[in-house]
Amino acid sequence: MKKEQYPKERRKEIVFIGRSNVGKSSLINSLARTKNLARVSGQPGKTQTINYYRINDQIYCVDLPGYGFARVSREEKAAWGKMIEKYLVTSEQLAAVFLLLDIRHRPNANDKQMFDWIQYMGYQAIVIATKADKIKRSQIPGQLRQMKEELKADEDTIIIPFSALTKQGREDIWDLMDQVIENAAGNEEAE
């Protein structure tokens, strides 16, 4: 996707990035309170372009292709990587980058690299720990602690457990998105 193909409307963008099949599309559908806004698939690698979803009059939720395992060629993965990086570096409306990680698994090298890159680019570290319904509620605090340790995250790092099935964490994510949009609007007014 070329920069001239980005939406022309000036709405803030909240980006969702993570491994293939981590639940980015399911999260967007949950936030929009619909089942079929973003295309969901059990097969990794279905999202192959940058997809914009207008959630309300203020924001786009942006679904990026997943990194990691997908049944596509190396060349195609490399092209996705370049497209994602170009978008993240050039988008003028980008307000926040949410990193989605599967709560059941330790962050891998790609997850850690993305987490570090998000901070390097000056964005607040926000992690959504997806698939929280797949483990016992009593396991969630330990998994979140382990995730924070593996990422070498500081105390201010926000990690929200989320389940598309039970809607756990959805309102917390909305509250955070509202806060990000308010902060972005305040920063624009100050300039």
Image (cartoon, helix red, strand yellow):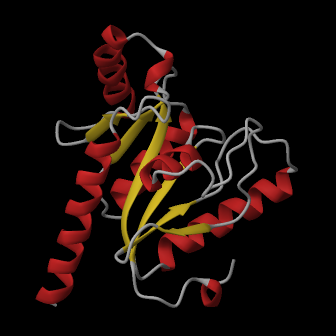
Picture quadrant where residue 76 is located: bottom right
* Residue located at (30% from left, 64% from top): 122
Residue 35 visible, this angle: yes
Residue 95 falls left or right of residue 16: left
Question: Residue placed farthest to the right in the image?
Answer: 73
Residue 185 falls left or right of residue 64: left
Q: Where residue 51 sits in the image (x, y, percent)?
A: 62, 66
Residue 124 visible, this angle: no
- Taking depth in this image into account, of 153 and 139 the one nearest to the observer is 139
Q: Where residue 178 sits in the image (x, y, percent)?
A: 24, 62
**Is residue 82 positioned above or below 127 on the image?**
below
**Is residue 105 positioned above or below 68 on the image?**
above
Q: Where residue 114 sits in the image (x, y, percent)?
A: 48, 48
* Residue located at (65% from left, 55% from top): 65
- Taking depth in this image into account, of 174 and 180 the one nearest to the observer is 174
- Taking depth in this image into account, of 109 and 99 the one nearest to the observer is 99
